[in-house]
């Protein structure tokens, strides 16, 4: 598997505080990678660096083949981002949201139209594209937000705690979207507090105190720690 | 209750922004109005066209020019020059004495002075004309007691009771009023809206606290702080600008407290209709600040407003408070002269408190 | 023994949206009762009615025999409430928050210290830190301490574990178990199905309707379909193919597996295996599995 994110000895310090302490890991193209850790373990810091929003103190980090020190503009053009907090514009229609975000990434009008049809078609929302977002249930919004995050066919899409609070069926539909996206070769990088969500990932890393303390497939981790669920694995490591 | 008030003080003292608004804004505003945005006329260039050139016109001219407000500019030879002089923008005002001025005055008890002002800057023109009028009026009183000069004489109160024509005297009552109004109303409405926004209001409501207790807990700290503010502004105007307090200081402070309580209850009323800090802020700014400044008589004289606005200005609490302050500070009047205004403000206070208690929801709907 | 909370045929709507639709349940004194449902299912509206913050559209709700509309003042004296977002004063320190919340119930932190000791002692080292600077888990503990400081008879917690990491969540549920032992009635809501097993009884709620009320174990017993866990080398193709299989009833993703129920009673998983082999799947794994609360929830949602 071709690595799309390469991190070697990444260190990020804020004054004397070490937020990321010599992280080393790779994420392969088309992989669904879960990035776990307790509050304050340093996940957000790493995620910011990978998105080109902040520079590491030291270490080598390449995202989509670009260097995070010097080529942040290229990185930003090749990634998508979605978080539970980040949502679409509530007072715009679905189509207008797609237009806006497509425009940000420099897609042509015809290309935006084509992608909007394609993505909405997959969700079965084609007939709804002129609905104003605020009238739409939360579960839908999350699926739409994800579609918008991949409108420009990024190499990687970062999901920051994407599925909080939706019903179990919608949540599964969301994960099926993620699988579909990964199947197209887009890498999915997910952070979450919820360990049952970790079970959907192909590989997960668990961070504690700025270090990666475990990195493997959920199955192997459960075997290693002789635990029934990822939650038990997490509690053993993080406690 | 005690705990509530202590908590409220913590909020205020720990938030740099509220501290700045509370204590920085009054000082800055007073200094700004006092020094920078001074409306005083100083050394305004004027020209005098004297067709008579007798002892009366010369006396009036020298009185005008020695007042310090005006300096003589171009001499004007005849009327045909006037438009040109104004066009050049060299003078702000031209004073024209009719011919045989002194003789007319003695014979007919009537003489004419024409005042021409450059009204491209209407405020300044207004002021200059007023100043000129006042000086001529003064002269008339001194030398021709019992005679009437046909000069148009404005008898605006601020001239009569503000013989030095110092603009700071006109502004201080307005500033005190606006600051107390804004700070009190804005700070309380924001602080209640913040509790709603943060979700803490939910917990307060579920506790055994009564609406009246919550309101009182919110209001009391601000009564104290706003009072300190009022005193600060008064001291600044007294020591820095020499503004007198001719009437009773006690009465002035008591009236200030009344007005503060009024503004606070208005703030609470605003917070009962707004759900976010932003909305509370907008409401206090647009619903309070603008009408306060525009309709209270602070900047624009109420008598000059269209009838509809004059009526509207009656429901502006600041209007009445400005009258009260001027009466106490400048005229030295006692309660017997301002009980009507006091009663109006007291009535408004009761109205807003009643409305707030009624509108203050004991539930979330 | 009269119930601690009694709700009968409760309806509530906001404009055209029905938030609660004929809700009826009882909670016994000292019970740990969970409401499990996604965002927007009506949990918060229900809790706000129980905490006297909202008036029901119709139907009745009683806490300790007192009506939530008529006797709201009396109820407010003995109710502990922790709203969805931890409603703490961010600019007050840990200690000041506790003192303030004790104060509004006319008590002091010292008077009821025993009750909160176990929870509060964990955050006491940071008592001079502002609440806004605490981590999610610590905020949650402080909010619980504040809700408990007046020794409430009934504790109502709206999504106390949302946005908190797994370690803190585990600790939080352990604390609730201890409070239950002292006899406090606890109503707690959560969007997370895996927390159901921590409750004595759970009510599954969706779209303003109660889907079921039972002990977690019994909810699972109510799942009367054989459930198959299926896994192959490509999960995405697996889901697509299983949906195309005419014998399939439901397919849901569960971690690395798909949970499948079939039409008719299937005794072995062989037909599934054969079908998947015919579709070219490798490393096929099919076995019977125990349903979870989440399986039950999805079954009930249908």
Image (spheres, coloured by chain):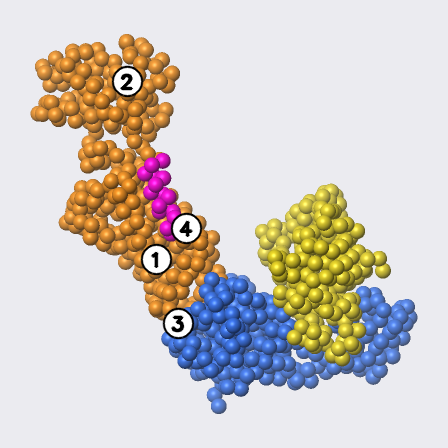
Give the percent coordinates (x, y) of residue B69. Answer: 27, 25
Q: Is residue B330 above or below residue C33?
A: above
Q: Is residue B279 above or below residue C188?
A: above
Badges 4 and 1, same chain: yes
Q: Quadrant of the N terminus of chain B?
A: bottom left
The tint of chain B in the picture is orange
Asked if marks 3 and 4 fall on the same chain, the answer is no
Q: Which residue is disc 3 drawn over? A: C104
Mark 4 or mark 1, whichever is nearer to me: 4
Residue A17 or residue C64, whichever sits in front: A17
Query: Gap in Å between the C-alphas at discs 3 and 4?
Result: 29 Å
| Secondary-structure class at tag 4 | helix
Quadrant holding the C terminus of chain B: bottom left
CA neighbours of label 4 inside 10 A, class few (<14), some (14 to 19), many (20+): few
Mark 1 is surrounded, within 10 Å at the Cα level, by few (under 14), some (14 to 19) or many (20 or more) other residues, namely many
What letter labels the chain drawn in yellow?
Answer: A
Which span is picked out in magenta? B20-36
Q: Secondary structure at mark 1?
A: helix
Determine which residue is flagged by label 1: B222
Q: Earlier in the sequence, mark 1 or mark 2?
A: 2
The CA span between labels 2 and 4 is 46 Å
Do the residues marked 3 and 1 share a common chain? Answer: no
Q: Nearer the viewer, mark 3 or mark 2?
A: 2
The residue identified by callout 2 is B72
Q: Secondary structure at mark 2?
A: strand
**Who's blue, chain-wise?**
C
Choose between B113 and C201: the one closer to the eye.
B113
Q: Chain of mark 3?
A: C
Identify the residue under disc 4.
B20
């Amino acid at each position: 598997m071709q690595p799309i994110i390469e991190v070697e000895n990444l260190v990020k310090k804020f004054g004397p505080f070490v937020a990321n302490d010599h992280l080393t890991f790779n994420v392969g193209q088309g992989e669904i990678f879960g990035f776990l850790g307790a509050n304050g373990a340093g996940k957000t810091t790493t995620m910011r660096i990978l998105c080109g929003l902040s520079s590491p103190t030291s270490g080598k980090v390449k995202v989509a083949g670009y260097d995070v020190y010097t080529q942040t503009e290229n990185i930003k053009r090749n990634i998508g981002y979605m978080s539970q907090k980040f949502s679409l514009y509530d007072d715009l229609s679905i189509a207008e949201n797609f237009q806006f975000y497509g425009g940000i990434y420099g897609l042509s009008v015809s290309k935006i139209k084509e992608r909007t049809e394609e993505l909405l078609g997959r969700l079965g929302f084609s007939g709804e594209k002129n609905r104003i977002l605020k009238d739409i249930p939360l579960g839908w919004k999350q699926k739409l937000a994800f579609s918008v995050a991949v409108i420009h066919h990024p190499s990687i899409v970062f999901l920051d705690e994407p599925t909080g609070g939706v019903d179990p069926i919608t949540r599964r539909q969301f994960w099926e979207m993620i699988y579909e996206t990964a199947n197209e070769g887009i890498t999915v990088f997910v952070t979450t507090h919820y360990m049952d969500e970790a079970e959907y990932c192909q590989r997960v890393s668990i961070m504690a105190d700025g270090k990666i303390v475990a990195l493997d497939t959920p199955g192997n981790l459960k075997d290693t720690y002789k635990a029934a669920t990822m939650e038990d694995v997490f509690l053993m490591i993080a406690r | 209750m005690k705990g509530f008030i202590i908590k409220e003080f913590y909020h205020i003292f720990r938030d740099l922004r509220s501290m700045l608004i509370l204590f920085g804004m009054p000082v800055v505003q007073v200094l700004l109005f006092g020094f920078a945005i001074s409306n005083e006329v100083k050394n305004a260039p004027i020209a005098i066209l004297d067709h008579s050139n007798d002892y009366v016109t010369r006396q009036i001219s020298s009185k005008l020019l020695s007042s310090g407000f005006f300096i003589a500019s171009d001499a004007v030879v005849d009327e045909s020059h006037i438009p040109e002089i104004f066009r050049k923008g060299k003078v702000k005002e031209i004073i024209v004495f009719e011919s045989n001025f002194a003789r007319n005055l003695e014979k007919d008890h009537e003489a004419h002075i024409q005042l021409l002002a450059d009204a491209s800057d209407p405020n300044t023109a207004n002021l200059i004309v007023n100043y000129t009028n006042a000086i001529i009026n003064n002269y008339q009183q001194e030398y021709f007691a019992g005679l009437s000069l046909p000069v148009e004489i404005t008898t605006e109160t601020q001239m009569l009771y503000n013989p030095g024509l110092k603009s700071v005297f006109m502004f201080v009552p307005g500033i005190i009023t606006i600051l107390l109004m804004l700070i009190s109303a804005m700070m309380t409405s924001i602080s209640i809206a913040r509790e709603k926004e943060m979700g803490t209001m939910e917990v307060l409501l579920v506790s055994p606290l009564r609406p009246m207790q919550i309101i009182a807990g919110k209001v009391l700290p601000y009564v104290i702080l706003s009072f300190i503010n009022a005193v600060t502004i008064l001291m600044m105007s007294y020591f820095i600008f020499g503004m007198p307090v001719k009437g009773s200081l006690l009465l002035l402070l008591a009236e200030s407290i009344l007005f503060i309580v009024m503004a606070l209850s208005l703030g609470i009323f605003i917070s009962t209709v707004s759900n976010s800090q932003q909305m509370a802020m907008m409401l206090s700014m647009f619903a309070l600040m603008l009408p306060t400044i525009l309709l209270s008589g602070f900047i624009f004289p109420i008598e000059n407003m269209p009838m509809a606005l004059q009526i509207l200005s009656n429901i502006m609490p600041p209007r009445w408070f400005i009258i009260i302050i001027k009466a106490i500070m400048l005229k030295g009047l006692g309660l017997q002269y301002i009980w009507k205004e006091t009663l109006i403000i007291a009535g408004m206070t009761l109205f807003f408190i009643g409305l707030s208690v009624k509108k203050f929801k004991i539930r979330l709907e | 023994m009269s119930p601690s909370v009694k709700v009968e045929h409760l309806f509530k709507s906001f404009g055209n949206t029905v938030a609660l639709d004929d809700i009826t349940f009882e909670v016994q004194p000292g019970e740990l009762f969970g409401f499990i449902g996604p965002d927007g299912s009506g949990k918060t509206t229900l809790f706000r009615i129980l905490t006297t913050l909202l008036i029901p559209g119709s139907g009745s709700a009683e806490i300790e025999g007192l009506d939530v509309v008529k006797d709201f003042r009396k109820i407010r004296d003995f109710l502990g409430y922790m709203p969805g977002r931890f409603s703490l004063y961010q600019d007050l320190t840990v200690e000041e928050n506790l003192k303030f919340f004790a104060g509004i119930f006319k008590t002091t932190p010292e008077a009821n210290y025993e009750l909160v000791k176990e929870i509060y002692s964990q955050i006491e080292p940071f008592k001079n830190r502002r609440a806004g600077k605490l981590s999610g888990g610590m905020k949650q503990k402080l909010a619980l301490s504040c809700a408990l400081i007046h020794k409430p008879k009934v504790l109502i917690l709206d999504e106390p574990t949302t946005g908190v990491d797994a370690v803190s969540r585990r600790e939080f549920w352990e604390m609730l178990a201890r409070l239950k032992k002292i006899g406090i009635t606890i109503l707690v809501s959560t969007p997370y199905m895996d927390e159901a097993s921590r409750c004595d009884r759970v009510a599954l709620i969706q779209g303003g309707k109660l889907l079921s009320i039972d002990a977690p174990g019994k909810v699972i017993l109510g799942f009367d379909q054989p459930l198959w866990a299926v896994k192959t080398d490509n999960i995405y193709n697996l889901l697509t193919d299983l949906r195309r299989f005419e014998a399939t009833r439901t397919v849901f993703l569960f971690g690395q597996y798909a949970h499948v129920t079939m039409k008719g009673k299937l005794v072995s998983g062989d037909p599934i295996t054969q079908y998947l082999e015919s579709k070219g799947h490798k490393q096929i794994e099919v076995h019977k599995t125990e349903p979870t609360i989440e399986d039950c929830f999805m079954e009930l949602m249908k």
